[in-house]
Image (spheres, rainbow, N blue to C red):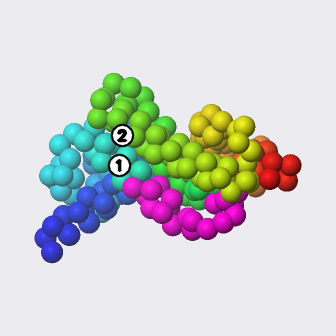
Amino acid sequence: MRTANHEERRQQVAAALLRTVAQRGLRQTALVDVANEAGVSVGLVQRYFRTKDDLLRFGVGFMYERVEQRLHNVAIVPPLRELLYELLQTFLPTDEDRSDELVLWLEFLPAARNDQEMSKMHRDATAGLIDAVVEVLSGAQRAGEVPQSVDVRAEALSLTALCDGLSLHLLATESIYDVQAVQRALSAAIDRLFTDDNA
């Protein structure tokens, strides 16, 4: 029970980190701010995380776990075109939680350039997403939904980069790239691979 409580506290602090960074930015976020957001003492936060980098690493890991859980919640059923769309749209910041995750991720990237552990976390998460898209596109090729001439890895890289770009615009220029616009753009990119002529 004590172990469960310990992990629950860490998760509580990680969730507070996401909210605090989304509101204040990483540079302006101190451990006391995260403690206040989590409703716990600074001493408790420091018991689990000795430095802000330790907290950031755990917070990003927590964020990736939430994303992975959303991926697991996508029903693996045909048609594969819809499966691919559902898989990729889980990364778009279409609600407050996902927006907070994106802000933390953007704050995390510069730190990852100079921290081997954080850099590996980012590489592994990105590679996992790309591999998942490759797997769906390869399955679509076997099912005759996507032509054999399509380079599934190149398309997986393109779709992943497109999601990143759409996410940034949804966060920064929502007056142009609103939720419906980015969903239509993602759908159009997928439709170019899944056409009647390709079947």
Q: Is residue 157 magenta?
A: no
Residue visible at 66% across and 36% down in the picture: 151
The image position of residue 32, as x and y in percent, is 27, 48
The image position of residue 119, as x and y in percent, is 36, 32
Residue type highlighted by circle 2: Met
Q: Is residue 130 left or right of residue 18?
A: right
User: Any mark on residue 121, and which?
Assistant: 2
The image position of residue 5, as x and y in percent, is 20, 69
Q: Is residue 78 magenta?
A: yes
* Separation of marks 2 and 1 at Cα, in angstroms: 8 Å
Mark 1 lies on residue: 61
Relative to the observer, which residue lies in front, 59 or 77? 77
Residue visible at 25% across and 41% down in the picture: 54
Residue 187 in sight here = no
Number of numbered discs on residues: 2
The image position of residue 42, as x and y in percent, is 21, 52
